[in-house]
Image (cartoon, grey):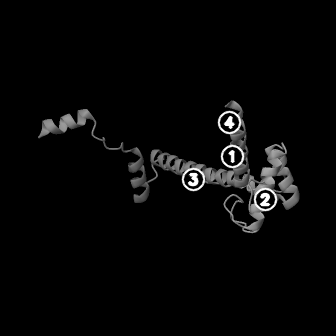
Amino acid sequence: MGSEEDPVKKSQVVDARARNISHNVRCTECGSQSIEDSQADIAILLRKLIRDEIHAGKSDKEIYKKLEEDFGETVLYAPKFDLQTAGLWLSPLVVAGAAAGIWAYNRHRQKTNVHIMALNLVRGVPLTPNEKQTMLDLLTPPPSRGTPSSLWRRWREQ
């Protein structure tokens, strides 16, 4: 009974590996689909090639390398990290860093302006109405949000 299940399990493992590899390989004819999803002739042939390579005992890396050598780097959905693709991989980090830098600069500038207004107030330099409103907004504590003690006070006052 164990010998009957072994070929079935091996076949299931081969199919799972083949599907996994096929999901990560772009159809050269369609371009926007993986060869697992595509019904183009080349996709069918590539799926068969992948299964044959798995039956031959090749690892996933070896199969990806063979496909890349035969069809070029664009056949793989996840390009490798090298000097040519560094901009592609690092651009999200550069954009996030720039956004964080702009946010920090604006935050620093806002705090600096408040400090300058406070110094002018101490020195006796009159503030403009806009500066007075900004100072009041910053120095006035926020209203309570309904803590139990404030709710109790409201109920008692009624």
- Which residue is tagged 1? 16
**Can you identify the residue that label 4 sits on?**
5
CA distance for labels 2 and 1? 15 Å
Q: Closer to the camera, 109 or 20?
A: 20
Which of the image's four quarters has the C terminus?
top left
Tag 3: amino acid:
Asn
Q: Residues within 10 Å of mark 3 (few under 14, many from 20)?
A: few
Q: Secondary structure at mark 2?
A: helix
Work out how far the residue at label 3 is from the one at label 4, CA to CA, in angstroms. Answer: 66 Å
Residue that carries the numbered disc 2 in the rendered image: 46
The vertical placement of 24 against 57, above or below, is: below
Gap in Å between the C-alphas at discs 3 and 2?
54 Å
Q: Which residue is mark 3?
A: 106
Circles 1 and 3, Cβ within 8 Å, touching? The answer is no
What is the CA distance from the residue labelled 1 to the residue labelled 3? Answer: 52 Å
Task: Determine whether the residue tagged by mark 1 lies in a helix, strand or loop.
Answer: helix
Kindly tell me whether residue 81 is visible in this rendering.
no
Q: In the image, what residue type sits under mark 4?
A: Glu
Image position of 51 (left or right of 1): right
Measure the alpha-carbon separation of dots 2 and 4. 28 Å
Q: Earlier in the sequence, mark 2 or mark 4?
A: 4
| Nearest to the observer: residue 106 or residue 70 | 70
Disc 4, SS: helix
Q: Earlier in the sequence, mark 4 or mark 1?
A: 4
From the viewer's side, name the closer residue of 78 and 45.
45
